[in-house]
Each structure stands twice: as structure tokens, then as C-alpha cells.
Image (tube, coloured by chain):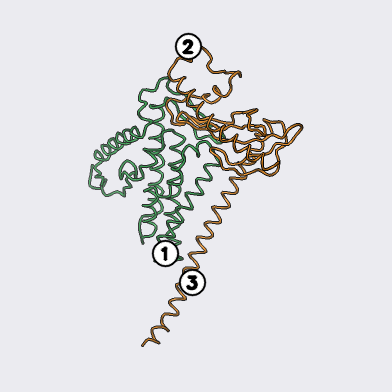
Amino acid sequence: MSADKSNKGIPAKKETLAENAVAAAFLGLLAVLVAAAGLLVGSGAEREERKALAELSGRRVAPLATAVGGQGFERVYGLEGKGARRYGAVALVGTPRGSALAAFVLAADGELEAARLLGEGTAGQPYSREGWFSEFLGRGAERAYPRTKAASRSPEALSGATESFAATADLLESLSAAVRRVAEKKE
Amino acid sequence: MSMEARREPFTPDPLLGALIGLCPVVAASDSLADGVILGLGAALSALVLGLSLPSLKSLMPARLRSPMAFALAAGLAALYGLAAEAYSPLLAKGLGIYLPLVAVNCLVLASLRRGLRPGEDSALGLAATVFLYFLVSVLVAGLREVLGAGRLTLPTPGLSPRSLLILESPPLRLLVAPAGGFMVLGCLAAAYRLVQRVRGRRLP
């Protein structure tokens, strides 16, 4: 009786193993597909970041980036050229008034040397308006903030500037620390 | 309002009629661009699952069908999220967790259940359902953004989504908040039900 049972169990076990193997292969294929798509999108984003940093700094971007995974940024690039070494990153800064993608160039001691707005989105935020980021970061540029004394008194302008200031200060603090860490490792 | 009209095949709108798949529409779709991206994600996932599962069913053992179907839904949502990130990084980052959550959208789950059951719904019926879902999610998002923020953000590719200013001072800023999503959806659902009642159709 017990021998019969074990004989019946063998083909059933084999069938189950085959089913499990098919399911595992299917899930593996799906995982490979998602990973390949992730790599493709990641490499496209890295190419865009390199282009933006080369344009902003006028230097050659080092072939290898350092993955840092900071707040709003993922990689720090070395910028090669004449003079002291510089570092660059493309970071996302966001507040409830909007989000902006900007390129930053920093010295090895973490001091910000240049920044350029690459794009900004204000989708769905009723109190946001185009230019909230550039108006803060672009002081002394074409549209300096505050443009007039009257404009700076409006609560909307004041709170918007405070929020973008706080968000940008947080980001720069984190980016500066990441650059210092990368620069120390290189030395 | 004849009896024949009532016997016509009828696909109720999943959002306004059946009130399923509300999460991305009322919580996250506060701009036209967000509505298009989330609505398209849920609609495409539901369509692909609904069409592929009946044929994949024969390859899957019965005990593994549900987990494999869920894995497929998660994989589709991940692929769609990556495609959205490549298309418009700022819009994708703004949507955050709502993009992967497309995998567990009720429309997608309903489509998954239909796909695993024998002889449920035709491909045409499914296509009509997901198209209606997409259309209504775009309509709700567009109305919320115009009346709540005074502008329309277009889902343009690249780093900066294009925004059109429609109203200098938006009349109902509340509509951009999640509560506003329920208000717009409630008004549209009431209008939809009224039209269906006039046409002699009873909604569940």
C-alpha cells in the first residue's frame, strides 16, 4: 500500500517540478525585461546629465560617475579640465509649489560654482508659477528676485521664496557633502 | 425608452458608472498631464492583462495562475513607470508612488480577474471599458486643473512639461486638492447616472 502511494507520487512530483520551473522561467524573464528597461532608461538619463554638465562647465565629463544616491540626485561626475578638479551633478529640487531639475558644478571643497535650470514643472500646484526656482537661484540674473519691493511684499512671493530657498539649501547641503566625500576618496 | 434599448449590450463606465479605479483619478490626477499618464497606465495595463491572460492561462498551472498574473501586473506597471520616466522625468517624479501603484489599480485587478475566469467579456468590451476609463480620467484631471489652478499642463516630452494659462485667477482652487477630485467625480457621476436613467438603463 505504501509502495503504491510512493509510485503514484513520483510522476505528480515531477509534474509539479516542471510547472514550478515554467513559472520560475516566466518570472525570471519578466525580471530580466524590467531590469533591461531600467538600464536603458538609466543610461539615457546619464547621457542627458553628462551633456548638461559639459555645457554648463565647459569641461570634459569623466567617463566614470560615482553613485552616491543622495536626496534628489543619484550620481556625482568628475569634471576634467584646466585648473583644479570640479564636480558636477544633476539634481531634482521639489517643494509643494513645483519641482525643478537643475545642473550644479561644485569645487572639491563643496562650494557651489555654477547652476543651470534644466526644466521645471508646476503641474497641479495651484500656488506655483513658472520661474519660481530661477527667480530664487538666478539672483543677479535676468529675472532677479525680488524684482520690486512691492512684489516682495506679497505673501505668495514671500512664502514661495522661503520654500524654494529651504528646499534648495537642503539639496545643496546634501550635494556639497557628497562632493566632499567623493573628492576625499579621489585624493 | 423601449425594452429593446434596455437589452442592448451595455458597458458601464468603470469610473462614473461602476466607481472603480478611483485612486489615481481623485488623489493624484490634479493636472491634465498627470491624468493622461496615470489614466493611460491603468488603461494599458488592464488591456494588456485582459488580452494576454486568457491565452497565457493554458501555460500556467491553476495553483500558480493568480501569483503569476499579479507578477505580470507588477512587471507591466514597472515597465510603464520606466517609460514615463524616459518620456518626462519631472512628471514621472512628481507622480512618485502612484506610478507603481498602477499595478494594484482596481481596473487592473478587475481585468486580471476577468482574464483568469473562463468565457468572460470580449476583447471589444474590455477595450471599450479601458477607453472610457482613460477618457474620464483625462476629463476629471483637465477640469480640476483648469478650474483649480487656471491652467492646463500638457504631457509634452522632455524636461519641462508645457503649461497653458487659461484663467488668470482660478475660481475653485479646492479642486486641485484630493477633496476636489471627489467633488468633480461626484458631479460627473451624477450627470452620467441621470443620462443613463433617461435612456432607461439601470446602473449597479
In terms of sequence position, does the residue under pointer 2 or pointer 3 come before the other? Answer: 3
Chain containing the residue with disc 1: B
**Residue at image coords 64%, 43%:** A66
Q: Do the residues bearing badges 3 and 1 touch, measured as CB atoms within 8 Å? A: no
Residue under label 2, please give it.
A150
Query: Disc 2 and disc 3: Cα gap in Å?
Result: 75 Å
**Residue at image coords 24%, 45%:** B202
Above/below status of B194 relative to B65: above
Is circle 2 on the same chain as circle 3?
A: yes
Instruction: Name the quadrant of the N terminus of chain A.
Output: bottom left
Q: Secondary structure at mark 1?
A: helix
At which x and y percent is residue B96? Answer: 47, 41
Q: Three-letter amino acid code at disc 2?
A: Ala
Residue under label 3, please give it.
A18
Q: Do the residues bearing badges 2 and 1 touch, measured as CB atoms within 8 Å? A: no
Q: Three-letter amino acid code at disc 3?
A: Ala
Q: Three-letter amino acid code at disc 1?
A: Leu
Q: Nearer the viewer, residue B157 or B98?
A: B98
Residue under label 1, please give it.
B64
Q: Nearer the viewer, residue A135 or B127?
A: A135
Query: Disc 2 and disc 1: Cα gap in Å?
Result: 67 Å
- The answer to which quarter of the image holds residue A125 is top left
Above/below status of B16 relative to B79: above
Chain containing the residue with disc 3: A
At which x and y percent is residue A78? Answer: 68, 38
Q: Residues within 10 Å of mark 3 (few under 14, many from 20)?
A: few
